[in-house]
Amino acid sequence: EVQLVESGGGNVQVGGSLRLSCVVSGFPFDGYAMGWFRQAPGKEREQISCISNNDGKSYYRDSVKGRFTMSGDNAKKTVYLQMNNLRLEDTGVYYCAAMGPAETLNSWYECYAQYGQDYWGKGTLVTVSS
């Protein structure tokens, strides 16, 4: 059974930090590309980052570049999203997703436009307040 379980969400003030985790099971984690997505209130879900678990290359949406860092631990079958300097507009439900088998990723465009999502977690809520 495939499972993706996110954790680490919560309430934080503007400028604060959070680290989200996503523990996965049931598929070959090492050879997969993974992504973090978020859905803000009243908006569509959008992808904000991706990583190739095979070589660790990661890419980001412009709105989070320089503030968020995605990483993976193959031994723990876990991906992380370190979020710093949080803004009000970062509020939303954050989801991790398994995008598909990938030896590497070469660009944000590749992971954003050329991959679907094979599996999803249920999400974790991040609320940023002033």
Image (spheres, rainbow, N blue to C red):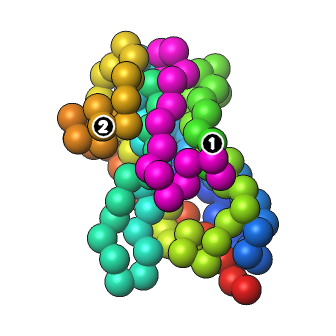
Relative to the observer, which residue lies in front, 63 or 72? 63
Q: Position of residue 122 (x, y in %)?
A: 43, 60
Q: Position of residue 101 (x, y in %)?
A: 31, 22
Q: Secondary structure at mark 2?
A: helix
- The answer to whether residue 73 is left or right of residue 113 is right
Q: Which residues are magenta?
A: 53-67
Q: Whole-percent x and y of residue 63?
A: 50, 58
Residue at 45% x, 24% y is 52
Residue at (66%, 77%) from the top-left corner? 128
* 101 left or right, relative to 16: left
Could you classify mark 1 by the number of other residues whose Cα lies within 10 Å: few (under 14), some (14-19), or many (20 or more)? some
Give yes or no for residue 65 being in the magenta stretch.
yes
Horizontal and vertical percent for residue 83? 67, 54
Above or below for 85 versus 115: below
The disc label shown at residue 79, or none: none
Q: Is residue 2 above or below residue 62?
A: above
The residue lying toward the viewer, choosing from 29 and 108, is: 108
Q: Nearer the viewer, mark 2 or mark 1?
A: 2
Residue 17 placement: quadrant: bottom right
At label 2, the amino acid type is Tyr
Q: Which quarter of the image is occupied by the N terminus? A: top left
Report the side of 102 relative to 57 (left or right). Answer: left
Q: Which residue is mark 2?
A: 109
Query: Disc 1 on helix, strand or loop?
Result: strand
Give above or below for 87 relative to 129: above
Judging depth in this view, the residue of 34 and 129 nearest the camera is 129
The residue at 56%/69% (across/down) is 90
- Sequence-earlier tag: 2 or 1: 1
Observer able to see residue 25: no
Say which amino acid is labelled 1.
Answer: Thr
Please tell me the numbered disc located at residue 69: 1
